[in-house]
Amino acid sequence: MTSPTSGSEHEGLVIRDNRRIDPTTGEVREAAGKAADQPPPAAPAEETAPDDGLAAQLAERTADLQRLQAEYSNYRKRVERDRVVVREQAVANVLTELLPVLDDIGRARDHGELTGGFAKVSEALESAVGKLGLVTFGTKGDPFDPTVHEALMHSYSPDVTEPTCVEILQPGYQIGDRILRPARVAVAEPEDPAPAADRSASDAGEAAEPEDN
C-alpha cells in the first residue's frame, strides 16, 4: 500500500493529495489556494431560437409604417399642388379684371397723354402686375400663331413670305403658361399668285385674237 503523501505510483494508479492544508507542515498549499480561488467554469449559454412569429409581426408593422408614410407624403404633395393652382387662379382672375385699365394706359401713352401724377400711378400699377407674373406679348412682324393671336383684320402683301402680324391692335397678356388674352392683330399673307396668272392668260388670249377687217 502506498502512503497518500508519497505521491508514488503503484500499478499505474496515480494518487494526488488535493488537500488545501498540508498535514505535515500545517501550511496552506499554494496550488490548492489558486484552485480554490478560481470560479467554476460557466455553463455554455443555451442558444435561443429566433421567434418566427415576432419577426413576422415586426415585418408587418414595418410595412404598415412605410405605407402610411408614403400616403402622407403623397397627401402633402397633392395639397401643395392644389394650393399653387388656387393661388394662380386667384391671381389670374384679378389680373384679367385689370386688363382694360392697362389698355387705357397704353392708349394714353400712345397719344402722349401719360404725364404728371397719372404717369407715376400707371408706372406703379404696371410694376405691380409685373411682379405678379403678368407678361405682355405681341410685336409687329411676329409670325401669326392662332394659339396666341386673334386676327381682326386680314390682307395680302408682297412684303411677307408667311402669315405675319403687321399691326398690333391690342397686346396679349399671359401669366406663366396661361394666356389671359390673345394679342389682337392685323394679319397679312403673301399675295395670291392666282389672280396674276389669270391676268397673264387673259392678256395672252387677247393678243392671239385676229383683228376684224
Image (tube, helix red, strand yellow):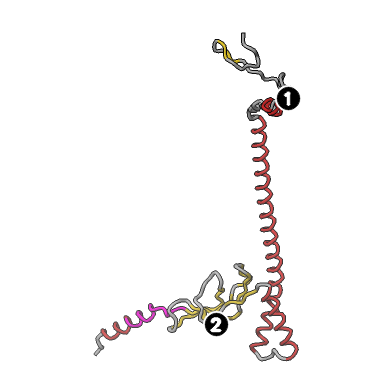
> Of marks 2 and 1, which one's residue comes earlier in the chain?
1
Disc 2 on helix, strand or loop? strand
Q: Position of residue 22 (x, y in %)?
A: 71, 21
Residue found at x 67% / y 40%: 64
Residue found at x 46% / y 81%: 156
Instruction: Judge whether 108 appears above or below 71 on screen.
Output: below
Report the side of 139 relative to 94 (left or right).
Answer: left
Disc 1 on helix, strand or loop? loop
Instruction: Write down the residue under mark 1.
Output: 27
Type of amino acid at the residue the image marks with label 2: Glu
Q: Looking at the image, can residue 40 be seen? A: no
User: Is the residue marked by circle 1 packed among few (<14), some (14-19), or many (20+) residues within 10 Å?
Assistant: few
Quadrant in the picture for residue 83:
bottom right
**Magenta segment boundaries in residue numbering:** 189-200
Instruction: Write down the residue under mark 2.
Output: 167
Whether residue 192 appears in magenta in the rendering, the answer is yes
Q: Main secondary structure of the magenta part?
A: helix
Near-viewer residue (142 or 204): 142
Instruction: Judge whether 100 appears above or below 78 on screen.
Output: below
Q: Mark 2–mark 1 contact, CB under 8 Å?
A: no
Type of amino acid at the residue the image marks with label 1: Glu
